[in-house]
Amino acid sequence: MDYDLIIIGAGPAGYVAAIRAGQAGLKTAVIEKKHVGGMCLNWGCIPSKAMLESAKYFSRLGMAGDFGVEGLDPKKLTFSWEKGVKRSERIVRRLTKGVEYLLKKNNVETITGTASVEAADTVVVDKRKLTTKNIIIATGSYPRPLKFKVGDESRIINLENMFSMKEIPQKLLVVGEGPVSAEVSQMLALIGKDVTLLKTANRVFPALDDYLNAYISRRLDSLKIKTLEGTGGYDSINLDEYEGIVNCMPRKGIKPTGALKAGESESFYVTDENFMTSVQGVYAVGDVNGKSIYAHAASAQALAAVNHILGITETMNTERVPLTLYTDPEIAQIGKTEQQLAAEEIDFKVNEFPLSANGKALTEAQPEGILRIISEPKYGEVLGVQIISHNATDLISEAAAYMAVESTVWDVAHTMHAHPTISEVFLEAGSDAVGKPVHKA
Amino acid sequence: MRYIFKFPDIGEGLTEGIIIEWYVDKGNAVKVGQPLVKMETDKVVTDIPAPREGVIAARYGKVGETIHVGETLVEIEIAGEAAAASGTEAPVPEAEMVEEKGAGVVGTLEVASNNAYLPASDEGTEPKPAAATAATAGRKVLATPVARAMARDINIDINLVTGTGPAGRVMKSDIQNYHSSAAPAAARTAPATPDGVRELVEIRPMSQIRKSIAKNMLRSKQSTAHMTLFEEPEVSALVEARSRYREEYKKEDISLTYLPFIIKAVVAALKRHPELNSEMDFEKGNIIYKNYYNIGIAVSTEDGLVVPVIRNADKLTVKELSKAVAEIAVKARDRKLTLDDMKDGTFTITNYGALGGWFGVPVINYPQVGILGIGRINQQPVVADGEIRVGNVMPLSLSVDHRMVDGAEATEFLNDVAAGVADPLSLIMRQ
C-alpha cells in the first residue's frame, strides 16, 4: 500500500482531514484538482464574506455624519467591485498559504490532479495508480443548473466566477434558495444593485425557524429586494429584463469518476453515522454527502471520519450544527426550531430579548435584532437558540457551548456576561426564562 | 430568593424519617451546616444541616411526624440571589458530608466456625451507597446540568451512572438509559412449583444496604492485598484480672468485658507499628499516617452489623473504655447511632467470639489497613515449663493490607497485641 489514507479534495473537509490524519501519523495524500482550500477559501465562505464586508462598510458610510465623521458626501460614494475583489484575493492567498504550510508540516503529500476511484483501495490520478488503506471523498458540490432556459448564457454568474469578475451588472436576478441566495441578494443590494430574488422554494431557508424566515422576508423587503415565487413555474418571468442571473440553486455533490460504486443517490453519497459509504474504508465528508452545506459541518465530519479510521468512535451530534447566514444583520440558529418541537410534541417555551434594549448594540448603531432561547420547561434545558444581530454568527458559539454541555436556562442566567456587550442578551433572555429579567418591563 | 429544602435522600433506600427535635424556628437566621432538625431514620438518628445560609421562612412537620424523602422540611429565604428553584440548586451538603474519608466499610467475616457468615457494614454512615468507589471517592462525577437535574428529579445517584460524554461526562441520555434499565428489575417473578404450594425460589430486590455491603466488600477485596495471620495467646492472667475486678465495676454499673483490654492492647501495638494505623493514597503516592486512634467496634444489631467508633481510644482508661463500649452498644441497639459515631475509624476490631466464633479471615474496613478478629476464649491444654496444664486461649485473627504492611510488621504487631492481652498489667506498666 502506498498510503494509509488518500483524501480527494482539499476544501474545508479534505484539508482538515489531511492535517488531522498527518498529525495522527497516518501516511496521507490529498488530491486537489484546483486550489488548496476548496470552495470555501477560494470561491465561497472567505471571498463572499470579504465582499459582504465591503458591502456593509459601503452601506454604513451613509451614517458617517451621525457618528461625527465630516467631509464625506454620501452622494458621491461609489463602489468598485474590482478593488473589493483585490482585497478578498489577498485574504484568500494568505489563508491558502497557511493551509499549504500546515499540510506540509504534517507530512501530507499534496497531489495536483483529478482523481478517479477505481476500487476501495485504488485511486488513479492522471493515469498514476495509487493504493491506499482508506479513502475519504471530500470533493464538495456545485450548484444545480437553472431550471429554465436563459438564452444568452454569458449572463449566468456562479459563485465560482463572481469573485473574480471586474464588474457586476446593475440589474440582477438571483435564483435559488437557502442561505447563499439571501446573502448574495443582500450583498448586491447593499452596494446599490437592483436585485430580484427568484425563490425556488417556499421558504428562503427550509431549516430555519418560521420566525427567522419571516424576518428574512421582511428584511429583503426593506432592502427593496423584489421577490418572485418560482415554485409555480417560470414562464411568467421576463428574463430579458436582467443583465445578470446569479445561480444560487441548491447544490449537488461532485462525485469522482471511477469504477467504485459506494452507495450513491442521484446527487450525493449515502453515508452512515461515521460518514462511511457502503464500502468499508471509503468515506464521504462535506457537501458531497448532502448532510450539510456548511464548511464547519464539513470540517467536523472530516475529523469524525479520520477518528473512525483511527478507531476512535465519537458520534457527531448533527443537531448541534450552528446554521449561519451572513446577511445584514446576520442570522444564526442552533438546535431545534419551534416547528420541529411542535411536530415532535415536545413541551417548550421561548424567551426573547431584543437588541434595541442592549447598550452595546445602540452604541454601534446596530439595534436591529433579537435573541430567542427555546427551552424545555421541566429541567430548563436549552433546546434551541436563534439570533438576529450584526454579530449573530459569533454569538451563536456561546449557544453552541451551552448546548454541548446540556446547559439549562439557569446556567445561562447565572453566567456573568461583561458589560457592555451584545452577549448580555443571553443573560437577559436566560433570566427571563427563569422569571427574573432585570432589564425587561 | 426562597430556597425550598426538601428532606434529602440520604441513600441506603431510606424513604422516611421521624422528626425528633426542631433546632430552629421560623424567623431564625441559619448558617450553612447548622443543624436544623434531628431526624430518626431506620438506621440512624441524625442532624440535618442547613444547606444554605439565610432566614427560616417556613418550617414543616411537628415533632413525632413522619417526613418522606422529597417532602419539604424548611424554606430558607436567601438574601440577594437572582433565581430560585429547589430542583436546580447545588446538591445539599449531606451528600458532600458523607464523602469524608473513613466513612467506609467494615469487613465481612468469613468465620471458620458454625457461625458461618457475619456481614458487617457501617451502612448507616454512607448516605450515597456506591458513591465512594475507589476511583470517584471524594470528587464529584462529571455531569451536565440537565443530567444532574434529571437525576435528582427521578432519584438516581448520579455517581452510579457511567458517563458516555466527553471525558466520561454523564449526559442526559445516560440518565435516561440508566433509569429505563433499572426500572423493570422489580417486576420479575419466580416460577411456582408444580403443585403451586410454594415457590422454589423467591426473587426479592436487593436492599440498598445489601448493595452497599456488596460494593464495599468487593472494593476492599479488589483494592487491597489481603493477608491474614493467626495467634493463640494464653490469657489466663486476663481472665483472672477480669474476674477480680468484675464485681467492683458492677457496683458502678459497669460490665467489665475483655474488649477494653483488647482495645488497650491494640492501641499500644498501633503506637509501636504506625503502619497499621495508616492509609495508602496510591494515586498520589502518599501514605497517610494517623496520629489519632479511633477504634471501630463491630456491633450486631437487628438491621445488621454496624461499626461505631471509639474516638481517641488511646486516651481512655479501661473503665472509660468499658463505658464507651457499653454506650455504643446501647446506642446501636436503640438505633441512636449518628453519622458522627461511625466515621473516622483508623483500625477495626470485630469480636465474633462473643457469638461463639473461633478463627476468621476478616475483610479489611477499607481504606483502613488492618482489622483484628477476636474468637471465643477456649480452655485447652497448653505447655508451659515443660508441663501440660489447662490454659485459656484467645484466638486472634489479623487481616492486613499487604501493600502497606509487610509480613514481619504484621507479625510483630500481632505478637504485641498477644503479649498485651496475655499480660494485662503490661497494658498499664508499658503505657
Image (spheres, rainbow, N blue to C red):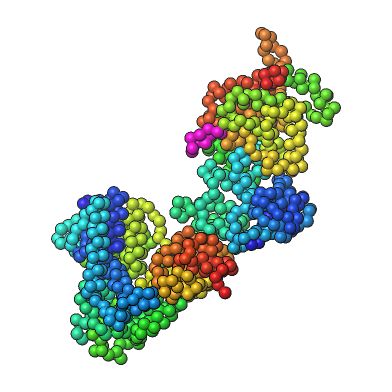
Q: Give percent across and percent down for residue A288.
A: 30, 67
Is B284 contained in the magenta span? Answer: yes
Residue B378 at x, y = what percent?
71, 22
The answer to whether residue B85 is left or right of residue A73 is: right
Residue, x 37% and y 74% (percent of image)? A68
Quadrant in which residue A300 is drawn: bottom left
Question: Among all residues in the image, which is located at the extreme top?
Answer: B386
Residue projecting furthest to the right: B251
> Residue A4 location in percent, x, y?
26, 52
Query: Which of these two is toward me, A420 or B145?
Result: A420
Q: Residue, x 36% and y 72% (percent of image)?
A: A326
Residue A171 is at least partly visible in this image: yes
Confirm whether residue B202 shows in the render: no
Decide which of A328, A234 is in the foreground and name it.
A328
Vertical side of B231 occupied by A82: above or below? below
Residue A398 vs residue B9, the one in the foreground: A398
Q: Is residue A6 above or below residue B44?
A: below
Residue B258 percent coordinates (x, y)? 73, 26
Reply above or below: B376 against A338: above
Q: Is residue A16 left or right of residue B115?
A: left
Q: Is residue B250 left or right of residue A289?
A: right
Stretch in magenta: B279-288
* Drawn side of residue B421 relative to residue A57, left or right: right
